Image (cartoon, rainbow, N blue to C red):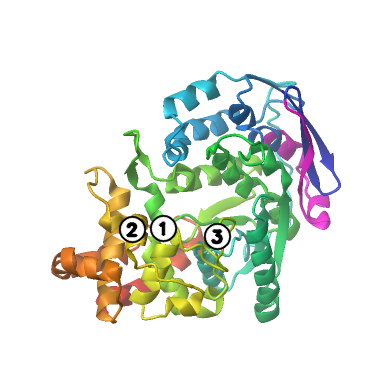
Amino acid sequence: MHVHVKKTPRGISLGVTGAFIAEPLEIRFPEEVWETFPWKEAMLHELAYFMTLVTPLILRHHRVGYETPKPRFYDFYNTCFESAIPNMVDPIPHEDSDDVLMRFRSISRTFTGPPQAAQMEQLDSWDPGSVVLPFSFGKDSLLSLATLRELGYEVILVNIDERVLPRGVAIREGLKKRLRQDHGLSCHLVENEIQLLSDWQVLEMPETRLHQVHVYFVYLFAMLPFCTHFRAPLIIFNNERHHSLSYVNREGYILEHKLMQSRQMTEELARKAGEFSGGQVAAANLIGAMGDFAIHRILHEEFPDLAQYRVSCHMEMSDHERWCHDCTNCAHAFLFFLASGQDPFDAGFEESMLTEEKKKHLSLFKEPVHPEDEYTRFLADEEALAFYMASKKGASGPLVDLFKRDFLKETEKGLGRLKKRVFTLHEKPGKEPVVQEAHSLYETFLKSYRIS
């Protein structure tokens, strides 16, 4: 397999030849943004590798030749992938972590030369009041947007269309128009056709999640042209605390629940932003110290004008308009709305998430839980508190009845502990002023939730 690469007027084009042939596919930026980006060649070397990182693995090809020098962060990409394998394998019964790791390490990769590590040229006129925000219309990016606006920052929103979710794209296009009309906020678009080269559905192979790791590298590198064009020196990532908690997967591996969305990985990506840009661009996370319930409450109770745009799950396999009604995200949102005294049907839900068949999406009802599984225990605490609050507000349904029967007394006894655990900032703010300002704002909200 050979990976062919070239620059285009709006970005980068990759094609694959050999036993598997793919026509050139592009990652496209707004023309004016790409035209002014000074580090095109360096970015090309990185994207050519990590955008096709898992293509030969999914297709079971053992040799890959690249038309580019070895990427500067080659070891970083491979380490991330290897570390994340148990995360990706966990939901796919036919995949095995050891087998995937062995096949990945057996791939022979050749490049045209060693890494090009020249320092990026220094630019002037950076604006410390501007930030770039990868924006999906999920609760995390919406809360980051609301926070940044509250603190007086100019926010450059960037949405990435990975070209495999047409229904989700259509929904977000409608939301973009409303956001611009209602708030004067424009959302820039990056079209990532190259994602198709690593998508199991497009490659017509058995279902896998091996394509998910490099998406987080895209979130970093696709933001850099916007940073230089708008002279915004900071990228804001959005990863919740519970992704960093230890989790025991079906094969017995103990690891961070979502390695690529963890606090550790945010810090690693921030370091790479600094290294690639010669210290001119940094990255940070505003919401990473909080869990799901805390983020939901702050967004919907303190910033309802932006919360109304929320879309939080995969709509391609659903007949519903806004929520798929068949995932943990939907189960949590439905429950958290009720706990806050809000009607989830006003937020677009079309059926209850408190019926018996939805029980599988909630950690509270999962047994047994491994003693080192902090992730499942934390989610169960969030859910227990939310069920308690919802039941006090008159919520009903089979899962509410089950909660009252099996968990109500224990929850009442530990109510203070639960509130403190759920509505708390779980880490100190980083050195960036915007993070410190955001944490001060969040602490004000969370303190009121703990005593109410």
Q: Secondary structure at mark 2?
A: loop
Identity of the residue drawn at 54% across and 76% down: 308
Dot placed on the residue nearer the N-terminal end, 2 or 1: 1
Q: Nearer the viewer, residue 440 or 349?
A: 349
Residue visible at 66% across and 50% down in the picture:
162
Q: Which residue is mark 1?
A: 328
* Mark 3 or 1, closer to the camera: 3
Q: Which residue is mark 2?
A: 362
- Going by the numbered disc 1, the residue's amino acid type is Thr
As rendered, which of 161 and 143 lies closer to the eye? 161
Rounded to the nearest angstrom, the CA distance separating label 2 from label 3 is 20 Å
Query: Does the magenta segment cover residue 39?
Result: yes
Q: Amino acid at mark 2?
A: Leu
Give the secondary structure at mark 1: helix
Please, what is the three-letter code of the amino acid marked with disc 3?
Answer: Ser
> In the drawing, does residue 114 fall left or right of residue 87?
right
Seen from the viewer's position, the closer of residues 241 and 89 is 89
Q: Are marks 2 and 1 in contact (CB under 8 Å)?
A: yes
User: Sequence-wise, which precedes: disc 2 or disc 3?
Assistant: 3
Dot placed on the residue nearer the N-terminal end, 3 or 1: 3
- Decide: few, some or many residues near mark 1? Use Cα within 10 Å; few <14, some 14-19, many ≥20: some
Q: Position of residue 15 (x, y in %)?
A: 78, 33
Q: CA distance from mark 2 to mark 1?
A: 7 Å
User: In this orientation, does residue 420 appear?
Assistant: yes
Characterize the local packing of mark 2: few (<14), some (14-19) or many (20 or more) Cα atoms within 10 angstroms.
some
Magenta residue check for 271: no
Q: Which residues are magenta?
A: 20-46
Q: Identify whether 168 is placed above or below 201.
A: below
Callout 3: helix, strand or loop?
Answer: loop
